[in-house]
Image (cartoon, helix red, strand yellow):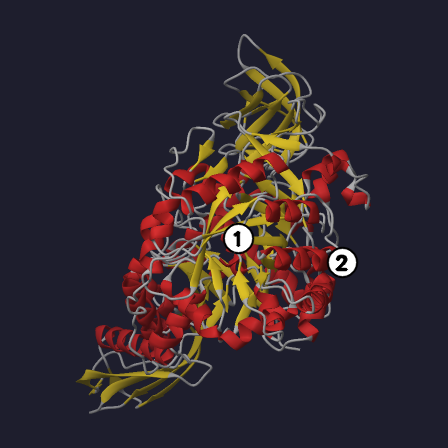
Amino acid sequence: MNKVELLAPAGSFEALQAAINAGADAIYLGGSSFGARQYASNFDNEELIRAVDLAHLYRIKIYVTVNTLIDNKELTPLVEYLQFLEMIGVDAIIVQDIGVIELAKKVAPNLHLHASTQMSIMNSSGVEFAEKLGIKRVVLARECSLVELEEIRSLTSLELEVFVHGALCVCYSGQCLMSSLIGGRSGNRGRCAQPCRLQYKLIDDQDQELLSSEDGQYLLSPKDLNTIEIIPELIRAGVTSFKIEGRMKRPEYVAIVVEAYRRAIDSFYENNFQVPEADKRNLTQIFNRDFTTAYLKERPGKTMISDKRPNNRGVQIGRVLRYERASNLVTIKLEEDIQVGDGIEFWVTVGGRVGMNIAYLEVNGEEVTEAFKGQEATFIIPAAVRDSDRVFRTFDSKLMKIAGRFYGESSMKKIPVTAFVEAKVGEPLKITFFDKEGNSGTAISDFLGQVAQKRPLTNETVEKQLIRLGNTAFTLEQWELQADDNVMFPISEINDTRRRASEELYVKRISSYPENKIGKSQEYKLPAPKQRLAIDSKVVVHVDSLDKAKFAILQAADVVILGGENFNHREIRIEDCESFVRIAKKAGVKAVLGTPRIVKEFNLAYAQDRLRKMSKLKPDALLIGNLSLIAEAEKYKIPLWLDFGFNTYNSLTIEYWENRGLETILLSPELTLVQIQELASRTKIKLECLVQGRTEMMVSEYCIAGSFMGRIHEKDCYGACSKPMFLLDRMDEKLPVVTDQFCRMHILNAKELSVLGYSQQIQELGINYLRIDARYMNFDEIKKHVKEYKLALVDKQPMPETNNKYTKGHYFRGVL
């Protein structure tokens, strides 16, 4: 059994040092561009070189995140960046965008590619697709269970990576548009604003709150992942790499978390698995939103959500015994030790939270620097609290001091070396250092050994100078001296020769690392501009029931898509699909059957079988929502359309799908009209844009209704999603919440997208299909919108500009 890799985050050089010293096997980090977590400090090119050299010195791998969606104008600088990463010998890059994957294979062909979790790979067929794409490792979706991990492992030899600790996305990664639609900051472009950490109320269509006062309002805020106690199960499932989330975290966090997981992993391989209580306590103290194992063991429901608080909870250290308003002194009964410098927070019964740092501390009327569990501690507080209010420590000064020893130049762990010294009369001093791999560094003095007049060279003198390796990465483990009996060398010569020998070993050790070779690069070219003929754009209506499909056909829609993920919580029967195809063809309407964009391993066989059955109905096209279904769908020789979950953002991605034979691509909803014009000008493949409807902001395995109003964590939701419901945000916007046939939750935009007034402009760009997403619409709305778009596109009637009731999405404002 190969030992599992422990993969640590680093958002700064200090965090990198902490990860190395704490025992990471590999570290992932981001450059100044093209990586998710653009708000981390990240590394410029000089720092990346330094980081790679330092990690490789310690035989630790470096993976660089290049996992954002890339715009056409960014491709040229990306080429230079990829070639730079190949040149400095990074061990792999982490990628999301298929265009980036195709580009890397051409311009930096020896870079290993890891599929980011943002590629939304969650089943064995998806892993197989990635492998054929040239991927060496897949970071699986965090929604995978242990059972699914084992199944996927049994069906592939590709490396599999899973998150084991840190913050969770409530949405399937790569499938979230919530940050961009609400605030213009795209998670797919590395700038997620984390709207899931904000307050929401769950209300019905009469604006009545559906949850009790005991429920919190952070309804989309997951607890932090913590799998340290199920490490044996994860290892036995066949996982290659354990990934710790946290590139936005400080180096002390990295040190504490990595060291705890290092200790636990090592104990497993020593057949003595254990997690010391101190490690559990430290993991909780350094940062927690409370902990969960997410979907690894079960579908946890509300027990996965930190609904009362979206940020660090800290550790409860006691309760208020008494508060003296006149002096602002508070006394608490301690359940944990505390000390001056700690940051604490009172969970106040009335008024929220009171936070402070302890600058002064008393026990029994005497000033102290530390107070212990069981004692009554008194200190000054800036605001009123009440008896029995809970008190939490959110900053442990003692733990932070311990963690602080893991980073800084003087803190770096040492590599043991052996020294061999030759000192002879009439010859230069020669010092050679060897590491355990056989790498060596040798230096020879300019000074020739002389016969000693007073102080000949002794073992003690040599040893005293050899051990002075404090400013290097090395520590002397053993040494040997071969010297003439009465030879003399000045101390300065010994020190200078030692320094140069250790420097040469440093260079030799780094250069002996099995770095990636520089591949023979192909020339990078964007697809040449193509003459895109003026077209008559077709109106597409996407529906989720046979009745809606029939109605859309009656309204003279040009294309109707039936299926995918439905917003009515009901499966569409194959018999309904058959009726739809027959009715559409009779009416001269193009019939497209849809597939879901979330396909877990447990329902992969079902999805593939449904594809087979749908193909027998001979629809005009199949809408593919998940890359794991591409290869299966290609077998049936039916035209394939790509849905928006593929995040198609640049011409290289379009070119890949065009070369593969796809017929139509729905472009990313995060593109502007200017960007769309650029993409359309470089391809002949048919393109589609979403123009009307409630844009899906989020899809999640977690369901608010079933979790809070039912009991999903107890295996029964009691049909809690059966009535209309909304999330009310802090701006009083109402976000519809719906569930699909797989009991997954979809959150829709508060405002309906509409670019009716610009539909002719979109048509002129060469966009073949304008899609109305009618899954959340009633019949009257479908009728209204189909008529309007037909008038605009066919009869060329001018249409009013979108009013405040609607949103124009990103067509004009774009995303950060």
Q: Can you tell which mark lies on residue 558? A: 1
| Relative to 697, 649 lies left or right | left
Pinpoint residue 397: horizontal percent, then vertical percent: 50, 39
Question: Which quadrant of the figure contains the N terminus?
Answer: bottom right
Mark 1 nearby-residue class (10 Å; few <14, some 14–19, many ≥20) = many
In the image, residue 497 above or below residue 337 = below
What element does badge 2 sit on? helix
Pinpoint residue 245: horizontal percent, then vertical percent: 53, 54
Q: CA distance from mark 2 to mark 1?
A: 22 Å
Amino acid on which disc 2 is placed: Glu
Pinpoint residue 292: horizontal percent, then vertical percent: 67, 47
Pinpoint residue 459: horizontal percent, then vertical percent: 37, 80
Q: Quadrant of residue 711?
A: top right
Q: Of label 2 and label 1, which has the lower sequence position?
A: 1
Q: Nearer the viewer, residue 340 or 299?
A: 299
Mark 2 nearby-residue class (10 Å; few <14, some 14–19, many ≥20) = few
Q: Nearer the viewer, residue 1 or 577?
A: 577
- Give the residue drawn at x 59%, y 25%: 346
| Relative to 576, 339 lies left or right | left
Q: Is residue 337 in view from this perspective?
A: no
In the image, residue 455 above or below residue 648 = below
Q: Nearer the viewer, residue 198 or 624?
A: 624
Amino acid on which disc 1 is placed: Asp
Depth check, mark 2 against mark 1: the one in front is 1
In the image, residue 88 above or below residue 310 = below
Q: Can you tell which mark lies on residue 575? A: 2
What element does badge 1 sit on? loop
